[in-house]
Image (cartoon, rainbow, N blue to C red):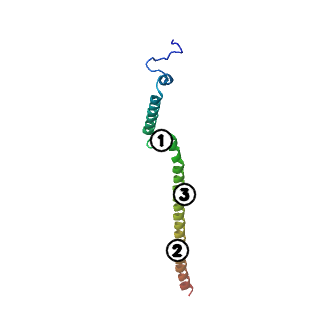
Amino acid sequence: MSDPEQPSSPSSPPPALAYQNTPNAERYVLEADAMRRRQLRSALLHGSRRTWREHARAWPAVVVGLIVVAVIVAALAVTQAFQKTEENEKKQEQEQQQSKAASGGQLWTVSG
């Protein structure tokens, strides 16, 4: 077993020890480089957005858009059903009028 005070791999010291002996200017350069690498990695993983958290903002818009599309489709379906019902009622009225006219004409001729 290794001593808890010594790092497990001697080639890579902990970050605190790595910055301990560096001057302030180099420390800022190293921190800026590390931050730039994190940003580039995040941009590579998540696209043009800065973090994965920004993806959650798109979901409410997608849900609202789907609801609006569903309402429009439902309204069109109801409108078409209403028009079809009116057409069927008109056809039934025309058939009833034709059958009354045909049967009414026969009654007049039979009784007359």
| Front label number (2 vs 3) | 3
Q: Earlier in the sequence, mark 2 or mark 3?
A: 3
Which residue occupies the foreground of this view, 57 or 72?
A: 57
Q: Tell which residue pokes out farthest to the top in this image.
A: 1
Q: Give the x, y percent position of residue 11.
A: 43, 19
Q: Residues within 10 Å of mark 2 (few under 14, many from 20)?
A: few
- In the rendered structure, which amino acid carries the disc numbered 2? Glu
Residue bearing the label numbered 2: 95
Report the quarter where the C terminus lies: bottom right
Whole-number angstrom distance, CA of label 2 to CA of label 3: 36 Å
In this view, the mark in front (2 or 1): 1
Amino acid on which disc 3 is placed: Val
What amino acid is found at the position of numbered circle 1 in the picture?
Arg
Residue 71 circle label: 3
Tag of residue 19: none
Return the disc, 2 or 1, that comes first in the chain's sequence.
1
SS under mark 3: helix
Q: Which residue is at the front of the view, 109 or 52?
A: 52
Q: Is 62 drawn above or below residue 38 in the view shown?
A: below
The residue under label 1 is: 50
> Between marks 3 and 1, how big is the CA–CA gap?
34 Å
Query: Which SS class for mark 1?
Result: loop
Figure check: 19 above or below 48 = above
Q: Position of residue 110 (x, y in %)?
A: 55, 84
Residue at image coords 50%, 40%:
52
The residue drawn where x is 53% and y is 80% is 101
Number of residues whose C-alpha sits closer than 10 Å to that of mark 3, classed few (under 14), some (14–19) or many (20 or more): few
Q: Secondary structure at mark 2?
A: helix
